[in-house]
Image (spheres, helix red, strand yellow):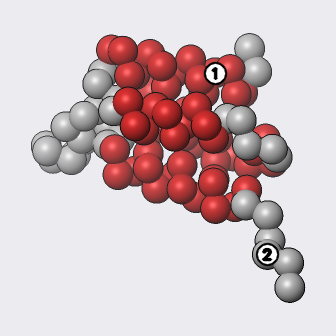
Amino acid sequence: MTLLEELRQVAVEQNQDAELPDSLLSEILTLTEYPGVLEHEADLRKLIGQLSNFDLYAGAGCFSESCGIREITETVQQIRTQGEPAPCY
C-alpha cells in the first residue's frame, strides 16, 4: 500500500467510524491529488498518525493523546500551503 493509499484509507475509515467531518475528509482526499504532495512525506505520515488517533471530542479531557479537528486541519493546511507553486513576478 502506498503512502497516499494509506492516507485515503485511514481518512475514510475515520469518517465512517469516528465521525471525521465530511468536509475534512473531502479536503484530505483532494490533498492526495496535489502534484508533488509526496515531497511532504514526513507531514503526510504525521497526518496519518493524527487521523489514526482522531477523536471528535479530543481536548475535552486531561492528558488525552487523541487528535482533534483543529490539529488535523492545521496539518492539512500546512501540506497544502507548502505544495502551492511560488508566485511568478
Near-viewer residue (45 or 65): 45
Question: In the structure shown, which secondary structural element does the residue marked by tag 1 occupy?
Answer: helix
Near-viewer residue (1 or 61): 1
* Residue at image mark 2: 87
> Residue 41: where, in percent of width, then height?
73, 43
Q: Is residue 38 left or right of residue 74?
A: right
Q: Is residue 28 left or right of residue 58?
A: right
Mark 2 residue crowding within 10 angstroms, few (<14) / some (14–19) / many (20+): few
Earlier sequence position, callout 1 versus callout 2: 1
Answer yes or no: is residue 41 visible. Answer: no
Q: Farthest residue toward the right?
A: 89
Answer yes or no: is residue 10 visible. Answer: yes
> Residue 75: where, in percent of width, then height?
52, 51
Question: In the structure shown, which secondary structural element does the residue marked by tag 2 occupy?
Answer: loop
Residue 34 vertical position relative to residue 21 in the rendered view, above or below: below
Q: Quadrant of the N terminus?
A: top right
Q: Is residue 81 left or right of residue 71?
A: right
* Residue at image mark 1: 6
Near-viewer residue (19 or 59): 19
> Residue 29: where, in percent of width, then height?
58, 31
Which residue type does callout 1 highlight? Answer: Glu
Residue drawn at x 71%, y 35% is 33
Residue 89 vertical position relative to residue 82 in the rendered view, above or below: below
> Residue 45: where, in percent of width, then height?
63, 38
